[in-house]
Image: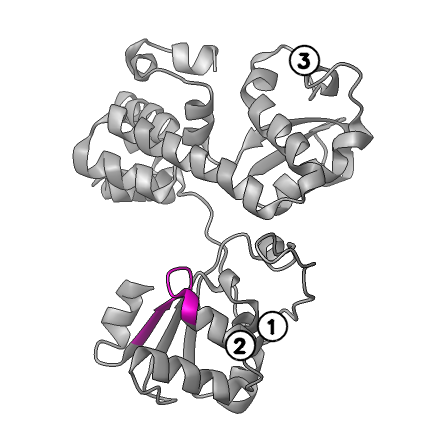
Amino acid sequence: MKTFAETHYPEDTVFVDLHDDVALCEAIEDSRSDALGILEIISTATGKKIVPGKTLLVLDEIQECPRLLTSLKYFHDKKPQLAVMAAGSLLGLSLNRDDKRKKVPAKKVSFPVGKVNFLEIPPMTFAEFLDAIGEGEKSLRIEERAWGTMAALHRSYCDLLKKYYFVGGMPEAVATYAHEHDFVEVRKVQKEILLAYDKDFAKHAPEALLAKIRLLWQAIPSQLARENKKFVYTALKSGARAREYETALQWLEDAGMIHQIRRVTRPGMPLKSYEDFSAFKLYAHDVGLLGAMSDLPQQALIKGNELFTHF
């Protein structure tokens, strides 16, 4: 967002971090102002004039201020010339969670459906990873389906793929590898992200689900290491049943933390028509974090095919 602002609105961008600016967020939440009044509050708090048709308003961590998210549709209706860009994480969960600090139930938040263009940003793909570490030409060959060139450089592509399996696609982990080429530092970043996730569970998850969410999340590596053809609930806890964990599983999926991959009864088209809902496996949303959860050592990168056969 900052790069876009510097390129297209170099002289007139108002950037607001709603996670850090608690006072502004509380002022917006507590006010009874309409959308225009909220713009006035932001303008006054930042000391910058917001001019529709000229200014780009950037709202980071918008999930911290639900009323501002709701106001996006009113900006669209009343100030359609105003350029607004917002970013938020775990929006569906954040906007419907109870406020544990104030000990009050969650408020119903009106989502700006039909008024906002959404862009979901998952972890970086292998091609994006190659771009980030200066191997953009190899990325282009994949995009072009240049099979002959890729076959000639088979060993190089395999080595890069192994590195991607270790580093994954979390932007900070990729940036650390691109700048330092140090797998130890990459693993430190990944462990910090996993620690932050655990804190997010405590912050966003319903207290009644918290223990089950953590059990499911922490069990992913051990479940994948088994020869079982599906996720086994009794491995979580003796006597555990699927229906006891369905809500917790859905929470993790809604949060974008996991991929629930179901078995198919036959390889027909479309595959969705042949899904077996009783048999599935869980994967973390990022392959690098999955390796960090498993404490996969970086030495695995240089031990032939061990990374592929045992993990």
Q: Earlier in the sequence, mark 2 or mark 3?
A: 2
Q: Quadrant of residue 8?
A: bottom left
Image quadrant holding the N terminus, namely bottom left
In the image, which disc is placed on residue 228? Answer: 3
Q: Quadrant of residue 102?
A: bottom right
Q: Is residue 171 left or right of residue 241?
A: left
Q: Earlier in the sequence, mark 2 or mark 1?
A: 2
**Cα distance, mark 3 to mark 1?**
43 Å
- Labelled pair 2, 1 in contact (Cβ < 8 Å): yes
What's the amino acid at mark 3? Asn
What secondary structure is marked by label 3?
A: loop
Residue 277 appears in view: no
Percent position (x, y) of residue 217? 58, 29
Q: Measured along the vertical axis of the image, is residue 3 above or below residue 13? A: above
Q: In this picture, which residue range is highlighted in magenta?
A: 14-23
Crowd band around label 1 with a 10 angstrom C-alpha radius: few (<14), some (14–19), many (20+): some
Q: Which residue position is annotated with label 2? A: 72
Crowd band around label 2 with a 10 angstrom C-alpha radius: few (<14), some (14–19), many (20+): many
